[in-house]
Image (cartoon, rainbow, N blue to C red):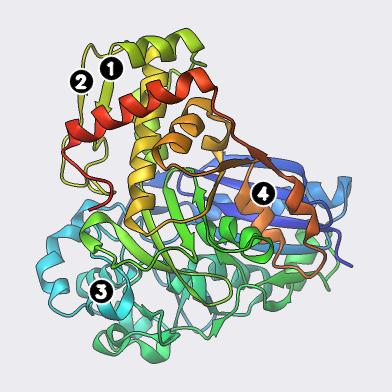
Amino acid sequence: MTDHIAVIDIGKTNVKLALVDRCSLNEILVIKRANVVRQEPPWPHFDVEGHWDFILGGLRDFHASHRVDAISITTHGASVALLDKKGELVAPILDYEFSDLDLQTETYNSIRPPFSETGSPRLKGGLNIGAQLFWQFRSDSALKERTHQIVTYPQYWGAKLTGVTATDVTSLGCHTDLWNPREGAVSSLAASLNITEKIAPVRKPSDVLGTILSQVAEQTDLPIETPVYCGIHDSNASLLPYIYTEKPPFSVISTGTWVVAMSIGGKDITLNPDLDTLINVTALGEPAPSARFMGGREYVLMTGGLNCTPKKTDLDFVLSNNIMLLPAVVEETGPFKGRRSEWVGSEPEIGSGKREAAIALYLALVTAKCLSNIGHDGKIIVEGPFADNFFFLDMLTVAATSEVFSALGKTGTSSGAAMLAPGPIRARLTKEQPVSVPSELVDHLKIYAEHWKRSCGINYYD
């Protein structure tokens, strides 16, 4: 049985390498580096060379100290690599937040499939991979001809490790405009862009791509027979453990740069793409109603990087004085996109516990709105950094009127990606902590939530 899985975990903010024990799903080691976008021609792009050196060095160190039996991969969505016949990049991997991508919005919108086909809303910049490809091919008229294959981001790293190219259903099903989740096939956009034959074969995340190349074995000292799993979109990696072990209905909140709410077996509801809802595709290839906003980015913007742990007295002050942050801090995404954020009451000082408490309540209330927009029902499991934010968890419990559980561990994405390797899955059942809101807080949080909703001018159940 595979015991130690090295998980390459590339988020929009940080690149991580985690060594996960397959039986317990505990992270033995975690290292990371910043994912800094290189502002260089031909367009802003990711530092894949730096990431690759970091990955190889980490694999070597992990194997020397603990042994690596297999490798799995999870990355953020909205990124693809364009490869030549030798498997090398024909152009840098474009940063999906590049503002110039919006310059061709109107033209791209005229060819993209409707939401009813793809479950993919029209998003800003390059969050729709189709928009990226459309812009790139128009910016460089020879680029499409030079492109032999298009691979999604987890599989770019898989190809570097094994030499085998692929795409996976979760990455193609992540608001790309390129996937039809109901049909389980590429959408009509592939034909419109004339790239159908260039999209690498679609695989399941749990498929074994192959074993590592000889040069990778030499640089890491890993056995050449070390298997590499196809890989998975990070939000779906967070969801996977619960798909295996929870009985629907339930929802999972994956937190990081993006806060992504995913509902399994929830209420039948018509998704509204204008509210940043979409259909994700699970590792099993099934549609999952989802909603998201840039909660982690908003947290950083509003704290100014001056983090502190708020006290109960800070929360009491915020609640009793109705100090509120209204959406949206990042105006381009989420259920309140297009709105400009503002403070109600006296804006707390940056670096203060009162500000931290108000931000936590804000993030929980926006998350609750995301859940209502996708027909959430049942328990809620929060994983990632926000799982340690007690005031966030308390308000989410009250605002969503649901049982909330916090997932333990540094990165739920790593545990989910490790589960792509075969083995027991029972261990995860002991890794949730139920949230118990202090009784004296419940009424105060309810009153605050109602005031916040009225200030936003919304009805959660419209």
Whole-percent x, y for residue 140 in the image: 24, 73
Whole-percent x, y for residue 228 in the image: 71, 70
Q: Which residue is mark 1?
A: 323
Q: Secondary structure at mark 2?
A: strand
Residue type at mark 2: give it.
Val
Instruction: Tell me, yes or no, whether the two marked residues, 2 and 1, touch with CB atoms within 8 Å.
Output: yes
Residue 17, numbered circle: 4
Q: Which residue is mark 2?
A: 344
- Does residue 122 lie above or below 9 as drawn? below
Q: Around disc 1, counting alpha carbons within 10 Å, would you say few (fewer than 14), some (14 to 19), or many (20 or more)?
A: many
- Can residue 58 be seen in this snapshot? yes
**Mark 3 or mark 4, which is nearer the start of the sequence?**
4
- Does residue 156 lie above or below 52 as drawn? below
Question: Which one is closest to the eye, mark 2 or mark 3?
Answer: 2
Q: Which residue is mark 3?
A: 115
- Residue sitting nearer the eye, 215 or 94: 94
**Mark 1 or mark 3, which is nearer the start of the sequence?**
3
Question: Which one is closest to the eye, mark 4 or mark 1?
Answer: 1
